[in-house]
Image (cartoon, grey):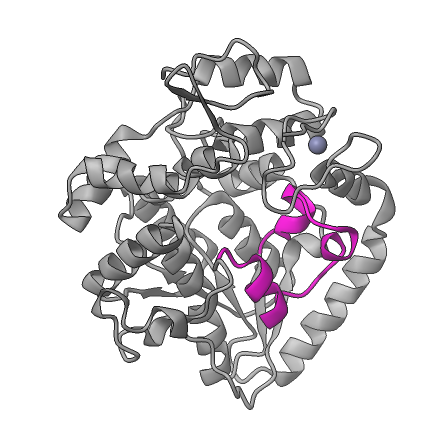
Amino acid sequence: MKYCRQCILPDTRPGVSIASDGICSACHGHEDKENKIDWAARAEAFQVIIDDAMARSDGYDCIVPVSGGKDSWYQVIKAREFGLNVLAITWKTPARTEIGQKNLDDMVANLGVDHLDYTINPDVERRFMKAAYEGVGATGLPMHMALFAIPIRLAVQMRIPLILWGENPQLEYGGNEIERLATKLDADWLAKHGCLQSTSWRDWVGKEGLSEQELAAYRVPENPGFDVRSVFLGAFFKWNSYENTRIAEEHGFSYQAGDRKTGTWEFADIDCDFISLHHVTKWQKFGITRAFDNLSVQIRYGQITRAEAIETVRRLGTQIPEEDVQKFCAFQGLPESWFWEVAEKFRNTKIWKRIDGVWQIPGFLIEDWNWGQ
Ligand SMILES: [Zn+2]
């Protein structure tokens, strides 16, 4: 396991590779943001996309997929600044939090947009999550499939010419040079980076008794017959999670201060109690926690040093969100032992070794890590 010498990401994280200079693709992405991308030219290109959307609009100019989180506030604010008539669309998580609901309600009211809250039959979500967790170790797969497919389907069927996504994850968290400079979220991107583990909805038909009809919400139209442009806002305007939070707060976005269940950002991952589970298994699979991602961004922003980040990881430990695991197991009607048995199945033995009866990662970021926790 190799770590970036600038941030704390290892090369086991999907999308992260470490170049011969010892610096990871996410840090190189940050350099691209600062030096390589011509933001003025990107802003002009964005204006062309806006003009095209308005020319082809039949009411709504664009869809903004929103969770109610800081980034979605920023996306809607930006779209409104450009005069776009926005239809905000949410895939409703079966585990929405109180603060998540409040932020969503406030966003719709304060920013003055129409909004669709799309609820999938919870029993279908439950079975799909079980199948995805047991099959590929990813509780978040159905969520990702739904939150991409629903806006794309509705854009096509409601003839809305533009979808405005948020960050380009390959620019923020690591991707190769071509991916980092990408502006479009298209079918290729979805297949490669949509957290779908190289599966499509069809692969899940029959699992846990899921029928084609039940998976309707997870399907992207194959022959759209209407051209929808689908772009990352973060490819046209320099993305900064802290700046987005500040702008969102000015308009009424709120969060609670204090330590997070997973990661270090008190303003992130707050809309849904199941999102933490998506981060939990990264420990078994890649040997990282959510804090590795958050702290690495903070290093790139110049807020903390690498040594301080390492100290924070040490202090936080593995950050297992016990309550969320319990809640998920209750949702599934299964004991907690089931959750941990499945997690164990996905332990990556290329990095994990059993030493003196305890699973450990040789060469881990922190030498004197407490492996018993
Ligand atoms: Zn790095």
Q: Position of residue 118 (x, y in %)?
A: 32, 66
Name the residue located 45 percent from the left edge and 77 percent from the top edge: 153
37, above or below 182, in the image:
above
Q: Is residue 104 visible?
A: yes
Ligand 1 - quadrant of the structure image: top right
Q: Position of residue 20 (x, y in %)?
A: 83, 35
In the displayed structure image, the side of residue 60 where residue 99 appears, left or right: left
Q: Is residue 239 visible?
A: no
Name the residue located 50 percent from the left edge and 55 percent from the top edge: 195
Q: Position of residue 66 (x, y in %)?
A: 45, 56
Residue 178 is one of the magenta-drawn residues: yes
| Number of marks present in the image shown | 0
Q: Determine which quarter of the picture holds residue 112.
A: bottom left
In the displayed structure image, the side of residue 66 where residue 80 appears, left or right: right
231, above or below 362, in the image:
below
Instruction: Depth check: give the residue in front, 153 or 142.
Output: 142
110, above or below 164, in the image:
above
Residue 29 is one of the magenta-drawn residues: no
In the displayed structure image, the side of residue 165 where residue 220 appears, left or right: left
Q: Residue furthest bottom?
A: 225
- The segment highlighted magenta reads 166-195
Name the residue located 23 percent from the left edge and 60 percent from the top edge: 127
Q: Position of residue 300 (x, y in %)?
A: 70, 30
Quadrant of image for the N terminus: top right
Quadrant of image for the C terminus: top left
Instruction: Depth check: give the residue in front, 17 or 356.
Output: 356
229, above or below 10, in the image:
below
